[in-house]
Image (cartoon, rainbow, N blue to C red):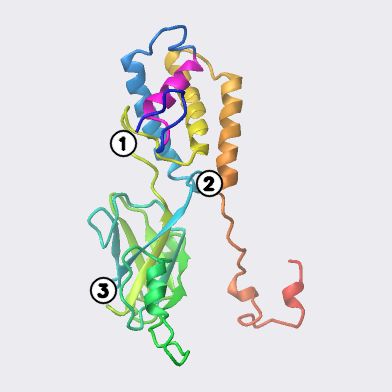
Amino acid sequence: MSASLNGAPGSAGYLVSDLIGMALEQLGVGVGGQNADPQGLTSGVMHLNMLLAQWQRKRWLVPNLIDRAFMSTGQSVYYVGPGGDLDIPLRPDKIEAAYARLLNGATQSTEGDFSRSDFDNEFMLGNDGLDSGVQPIDYPLELIQSYEDYSGLGLKALRSWPNYAYYNPAFPMGEFRPWPIPSEAIWEFHLIFKAPLPANLTLTDPVNLPPEYWDAIMWSLAARLSPSYGQPANPTVTAAMKAALSTLRASSTQVPTLGMPSILSPINNPFYWPGLEIQRL
């Protein structure tokens, strides 16, 4: 999909060559009727792929999260990545959230959660107005944040209702470890992680990202390519790059509701007194 003749992007966005060419123009390369050299374009493609690989690890630079599911088989460790229990092209560096679904006789999800067809099929009302379908129940899993904390579990082989999970971002496949270990077949794990950004782009590929990314990519490439042409970081380029990245931050940032430690909640706190919930700690 190429850009139109008047310089506007096509339906899938600008081509990689378009953005690299505009980035080089900010450095004075390819202007005045001169064409950028092939090596410069090749270097620009490599920098673009490295740039997107860095952005992939930053939550505020990824436009959305995705939910992917796989069945419990009674294992203590599930592999996430190409060819794993959750078969996806690239293992995520981090799980943003996770939950376990007690299927209750419902069919297994194929594309994760929030599919309209799932709800249409599973929550149909009968002629009597009562729910005659099956209702899977989702239970949030509290994420254990480090391997050190996971290693502190005394009975790692405990088999019961799942409450916690640890994700080890090993390469090339991550390791998902639920705890306690649930039974097979009746549970389904849902992992929520950052949607993958385009990878391994070539010069003729479209940059299929939301429109606000085009400006950020162009100015970021201009800043990255400056040393290759013996130039210091131009203050104008740096300022434009920061402004474009701030736009991405504003559009992509999602802040979850603040949760309180269980010891501070009225139900679990042995030192609770009326009015504790409104105290300013």
**On residue 186, which mark appears?**
none
Q: Position of residue 266 (x, y in %)?
A: 66, 80
**Nearest to the observer: residue 247 or residue 141:** 247
Q: Position of residue 18 (x, y in %)?
A: 41, 25
Residue where numbered disc 1 is placed: 200
Query: Residue at image x 36%, y 83%?
Result: 104
Asked which secondary structure carries label 1, the reply is: loop
**Nearest to the observer: residue 94 or residue 21:** 21
Q: Earlier in the sequence, mark 3 or mark 2?
A: 2
Query: Given the image, on which type of amino acid does mark 3 rest?
Result: Thr
Query: Given the image, on which type of amino acid does mark 2 rest?
Result: Trp
Q: Determine the CA span between mark 3 and mark 1.
A: 34 Å
Asked which secondary structure carries label 3, the reply is: loop
Identify the image quadrant of the N terminus. Answer: top left
Main SS class of the magenta portion in the image: helix
Label 1 with label 2: CB-CB less than 8 Å: no
Q: Residue furthest front?
A: 127
Q: Which residues are magenta?
A: 13-27
Residue where numbered disc 3 is placed: 73
Residue where numbered disc 2 is placed: 60
Q: Earlier in the sequence, mark 3 or mark 1?
A: 3
Residue 124 visible in the current orientation: yes
Q: Residue furthest left?
A: 83
Circle nearer the viewer, 3 or 2: 2
Residue 24: within the magenta?
yes
Q: Determine the CA span between mark 1 and mark 2.
A: 21 Å
Q: Is residue 72 above or below residue 129?
A: above
Query: Residue at image x 47%, y 32%?
Result: 217
Q: Earlier in the sequence, mark 1 or mark 2?
A: 2
Query: Residue at image x 44%, y 13%?
Result: 229
- Residue 26 is left or right of residue 207, and the answer is right
Q: Quadrant of residue 186?
A: bottom left
